[in-house]
Amino acid sequence: MSLFDPLFRWDALQELFADRARLQAMLDFEAALARAEAATGVIPARAAEAIVAKCRVDRIEIEALAADAARAGNLAIPLVAQLTGLVARDDPEAARFVHWGATSQDAIDTGLVLQLRPALERIDGELRRLADALARLAAEHRATPMVARTWMQQALPTTFGLKAAGWLDAVTRARERLGEVRRRALVLQFGGAVGTLAALGSRGSDVAAALASELQLRLPDVPWHAHRDRIAEIGGALGLGTGTLGKIARDVALCAQTEIGELAEPEAEGRGGSSTLPHKRNPVASAIVLSAAARVPGLVATLLGAMDQEHERGLGGWQAEWETLPEIVGLTGGALHHLTNAIVGLRLDTARMRANLEATQGAIFAEAVQMALGSALGRAQAHERIASACRAARTEGRQLREVLAADETIARLLSPEELDRLFDPAAYLGEAGRFVERVLAAHAAVRARE
Amino acid sequence: MSLFDPLFRWDALQELFADRARLQAMLDFEAALARAEAATGVIPARAAEAIVAKCRVDRIEIEALAADAARAGNLAIPLVAQLTGLVARDDPEAARFVHWGATSQDAIDTGLVLQLRPALERIDGELRRLADALARLAAEHRATPMVARTWMQQALPTTFGLKAAGWLDAVTRARERLGEVRRRALVLQFGGAVGTLAALGSRGSDVAAALASELQLRLPDVPWHAHRDRIAEIGGALGLGTGTLGKIARDVALCAQTEIGELAEPEAEGRGGSSTLPHKRNPVASAIVLSAAARVPGLVATLLGAMDQEHERGLGGWQAEWETLPEIVGLTGGALHHLTNAIVGLRLDTARMRANLEATQGAIFAEAVQMALGSALGRAQAHERIASACRAARTEGRQLREVLAADETIARLLSPEELDRLFDPAAYLGEAGRFVERVLAAHAAVRARE
Amino acid sequence: MSLFDPLFRWDALQELFADRARLQAMLDFEAALARAEAATGVIPARAAEAIVAKCRVDRIEIEALAADAARAGNLAIPLVAQLTGLVARDDPEAARFVHWGATSQDAIDTGLVLQLRPALERIDGELRRLADALARLAAEHRATPMVARTWMQQALPTTFGLKAAGWLDAVTRARERLGEVRRRALVLQFGGAVGTLAALGSRGSDVAAALASELQLRLPDVPWHAHRDRIAEIGGALGLGTGTLGKIARDVALCAQTEIGELAEPEAEGRGGSSTLPHKRNPVASAIVLSAAARVPGLVATLLGAMDQEHERGLGGWQAEWETLPEIVGLTGGALHHLTNAIVGLRLDTARMRANLEATQGAIFAEAVQMALGSALGRAQAHERIASACRAARTEGRQLREVLAADETIARLLSPEELDRLFDPAAYLGEAGRFVERVLAAHAAVRARE
Amino acid sequence: MSLFDPLFRWDALQELFADRARLQAMLDFEAALARAEAATGVIPARAAEAIVAKCRVDRIEIEALAADAARAGNLAIPLVAQLTGLVARDDPEAARFVHWGATSQDAIDTGLVLQLRPALERIDGELRRLADALARLAAEHRATPMVARTWMQQALPTTFGLKAAGWLDAVTRARERLGEVRRRALVLQFGGAVGTLAALGSRGSDVAAALASELQLRLPDVPWHAHRDRIAEIGGALGLGTGTLGKIARDVALCAQTEIGELAEPEAEGRGGSSTLPHKRNPVASAIVLSAAARVPGLVATLLGAMDQEHERGLGGWQAEWETLPEIVGLTGGALHHLTNAIVGLRLDTARMRANLEATQGAIFAEAVQMALGSALGRAQAHERIASACRAARTEGRQLREVLAADETIARLLSPEELDRLFDPAAYLGEAGRFVERVLAAHAAVRARE
């Protein structure tokens, strides 16, 4: 564990990408390969047993392996060497058949896929927990009025329910995309030195099929050593997810500003304090999520930029992926975990929401009045008249409602009661409620299928 | 048209993203909105007719619009203003109803979607043309031997058919992804000022449904003004596609090196010459594709990084998309078009392919011998023995086959005939042929469904 | 001009990077080359005159050139071809000597440098205008109190003068960096086909020196066709500058929020309105600057990623620069110009600044009290005591000053007068004034040297 | 140490960025602060001694600290808490004065600067070692002919000395830039909670000056908590350096291709082997350098994109730097160290270089002939005539020299002896030698000043 891991990452994922887990995943490949080759009669069953017995990371000398990897250029070569040595100690005959017909990249890529499979499953589960929490917020607050802001300026009333529903809708799409990517990208890598499986003579396809079956991975039509779109698309889907998490965190952080005060992250002992300011409660989760949203795009670009891998195995591009994709997984997972906790415990101050609706002395109801006048005056003329009333109200420090009531043309067109209604936030929410319903229904449908 | 457009872009896409096309797409939104509002009784049918009649970009004063946009902060405000003026000249009553209940972003985003729809369709068509060309190459050359290279070093024999099949397999995935994205991302944007459609009172949903139907766009559950994952995922899918194009171009450029000479881009008058060197034939298409592959990742990162848009409409992030996504489309399309032409006319020098198989004095057949010896000696011992023979052959400038024949242990295990067979590239292709078949079958299945 | 140019770019730079300007810069190279070669006796003086006479972009057929460039792979080949044709019409002898001994990249790179020279000078001038405006703000408001915010939470008092001084300090560094880059990167490119100037026999160095002198460019030690660090570092320096502009715009946009209202961009007719909301005044300049700050980093990454150019001239990497660096210049310049205008006309609401200091019921003065108590109680105990008082004040809706006054321990240590002073923002500004002075002095020193 | 550290990083830098080193650097800040405050009479000398005595990382419980950091949002808060506890155990009075007047970011940023100072010094030292090795190569091979390649096609003769000189020239600029950045960016961070040093009353500036002096860091005009251009420019300078390393590695990898064989990385036991192919010698160092060149640009973009930090301390942007800049340092350092070792032991095959000059049957001498004919025929006509001869030679498989000798026009203008000379690579090297001299002289001048 490194110092920043608890801050930026989620331990449920970190354990899957620890050094030992990475090696074990490669050893799982080697074990499954031995089994598949025994099952297809390519190597003796006894040899397979001897090999499988040694495919345990606790037998591996990791420091030596790391040093050898720097010379060899990848992890598989020294790992296979150590494994062969371990097998040979007990059964020199069997040692001949370690890694039989495979290439380093087969072990490395398939090992990565074996790590990604549970990782993406856990991420999906956490996205589901986030979606459920958002659905609760949307349902509970479907009628809670707050101000909507565009270009960081107060615009019109909306509801917190609609804001939460918008977040949920995007999270639902993130899960949908992740599902597509998991189906397409989590496939076996097995091609031998150059993707022909030539070392296995006529048995390559049989072994490949048995190996895929052993590992319960889909068998692709062709090995993909130098075609990295699957790897890059996993990064891309996580990048899109992190972007959505960033959008939610940005909203939370803005609404948590001292001067706005509508939302707050959950409080806890030692959380979000300051080393010097006793009154501070910093939105730590938002900061973590926003930092991930700032970091992941560049990492996704790295994966995309590394796709032009040379010939049958790349020089530089492939190696650029090794730490980059796990980093994307780690940052996305950390952001997700922190944000989910923050949303589950999110504190709303509905009184501040209501108070903030008053901040513009009525100007945020200007559109409502304009639409009411529009059928009589036309959109453009109504727009201009109201804009001028807004300027007057602002300059003179008056309520817009008063300024309008004092305008004879307007007074002729709108009664005091009509004006009152136009300045009621609850009366100018349009389809907000219906939109919330639709998003909740879509969420429920997804959950019902699970 | 700008100077670099013919070099980096494809005119079939550029016409869709020209200034006039962009404005027309927004006017198409305004016209459809008027029709939808007339159909739902929100505005008079006569007004809709008057509006629709003016929704033609040739009526718009573009320079003035651009200057006004710089003040207003977006294109829709001055466009709506000009449109309103045009309508008002003939029918002041109707002018009231221009852009009724909509917001700038509704017009801008939906306009963009209306541009993207044909653009992605053309890209898919060109990907199909590329896939067909690759399928022809894979089929024709399924048995054409060439050397496979890993880490930019000769490794083993393979076939050009398998190389082409690998390219095709990746292009097929690019089309699959693009299909998913088109289904998910090409949806209507219509939410009014803050995404509630409040200005339309109780008619918002009806108008939205009618509008979606007018434009033949899918209606999303909720407006998505500040949720930009759909935009970013279009960029991401194109980025993955460009990455695959870059991989193909990298292979072509490497195989076209003077010293390798296995592939060449099609020749044409004035193509790939030098301003000073009379003998040069530069691989221009590869350069263009590789430059796109270098440029698109950073643009995708921009879209991902801009996703944390504030509240109900972003400040900066949204604006960052306006030129970025069209640029991704343009670069991807240009790369695709140039590469497809290059692949359609690709020149193969199969004699050079065969000659290059001889370049290592037999060392690329080392694995074949090693596997043949492996069952007798074990993989590790065989590996070491052959590696040492390779070193000897290299140092002494001899053929590996000779060195091995002179090794008594090996001579005992392998007869001269067996050795001959082990040094025949056609005999060490493993599943290459079968892999080609599978990829071609998958391609045929896709094409049969179209 | 394209639709978005007035919004995102600055016309003073756009004119330098228009298609015609780009070609003219290359023609300026060709003319200077002819003169230099005449001056060194490499070509006849008469030929140079004939060539120079035709080096005018208004003679060039641009559409044909663009189409030919797509085939040739760069702009120089068809430009040289057209120029040769023009010269040949009047003086076939002279036409022999067009582009004598040069390569396409010499014309393209040097042309770019000739465009960058005035562009960077104009950017520096505008940065100076920005710095001057910031210096005025810092000086005028060195004692204007406002609240400082960390983690987007109110923290302590500061002054607007210090905020402006922080902006100025960073702008000063941006100018310093730009100066270094201009000195190092704006150098002649002249190496002939592969950087040896072999085509000029023994006269290469003489011609190069004369050419550098003609163009008033520094002569580098060696041609740099495939070493692109100079190009990338120009992009990097502009990227750092844009980052600083983005920081300033972020602050302005946050302070311009409806609920904060401390700053506003200058008002102007048609500026920052909404297509539907009559009361809106959107911070358009901030949006533009923030969009540039979101876009430029990915473009800088493209330049950095494209640096691994092959051998003596790159394939793909070089081409990736052609539009990217001008785009960085354009976006930086546009952001700079818009921000400078916004800062020159920036509106301050010092009353809101003062009012916002009251928003936390005194909690922002907590550190002051803590430090006052610290020498008696120790930092940790004081911190804890005050944090608890803050919680009490917040929960009970009381002023922190009252809560503290009611605490006997504290009352014993701090008199009411002392407490009053601790809750005076002007009394807790530390070195703010002195920091402002230092930054202003540094700015004045820079300006005095100019 | 993690599995990939020996592969991608350099242990001389990794030790500077280990968890413990990071904490120690922050403790060094705290110790120096205590000393500076004692020296200026702000805290008792005895307290400073007590604090300084505990500022040792071996006293810190790192796992607990990491867990607390995840709650607090940064490392400084729990570190200060543990330090305070340690001091309090021995001297409760002194514990009051731990971190007196400082803020978390002061400790974190200054700590980072204290790590960067030796790191950049070591990087500069390794760049110097690389430069020296390149200078030796350039000097030794100033006259070694090889073919120059543009667009990945053989173009003309050059020398390996010139290639090495081009590399050296770029490395020299990398050192120059790094020097500028070290001078500008390695400064003290000390501003207290919001950058005013208010907690120190009137003593802030004195303490700051004493602290800078204690740490031997330059004192900036103003704290820079939310102005991150210094951090980003360090990343940028390293990014430019990595780009240059990538360029060198790209050239090495291309020249090491089996079919070219002009360069090879040094051989060593276990280096660059394959898990299955006994004959392979993979260019591992090049792969590592190229992978760094693919990864660093996205990380630099992250730093640039994170510069828009809010108000007086950012939310998300600052946090995004914490792992990103050390990662850039680590990848750059690793690439540098591996490349330097590869260059120091670089193997040249000058016979292959000479043989490759023959690969085009003389076409690479076409320009020489063209220039020789140019004064008689004009550049354009000569270009066309030679281009046609090149096509004939290629099509008919003849030597270009023969084709030309058989052309009567040419035979009239060039004697057989002249033709012979034109086909001698050593006779067409132009200024290559002089360029090498200049670069070596510049290198010697830099080294003489050191």
Image: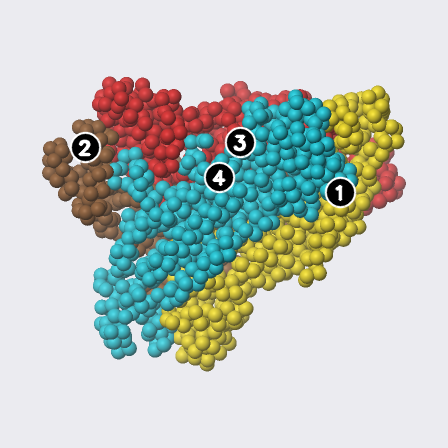
Chain colours: A cyan, B yellow, C brown, D red
Picture layout, residue C221 above or below residue B39: above
Say what secondary structure mark 4 lies in: helix
> Residue drawn at (27%, 37%), measured in percent from left and top?
A277
- Residue underneath mark 3: A19
- Residue underneath mark 2: C372
> Residue drawn at (62%, 41%), measured in percent from left and top?
A215
Q: Are marks 3 and 2 on the same chain?
A: no
Disc nearest the viewer among 3 and 2: 3
Q: Which amino acid does label 2 sit on?
A: Ala
- Contact (Cβ within 8 Å) of mark 3 with mark 2: no
Q: What residue type is labelled 1?
A: Glu
- Contact (Cβ within 8 Å) of mark 1 with mark 4: no
Check the residue under mark 1 and report the chain it is in: B
Q: Gap between marks 2 and 4, in whole Å?
A: 46 Å
Circle 3 residues within 10 Å: few <14, some 14–19, many ≥20:
some
Residue A200 in sight here: yes
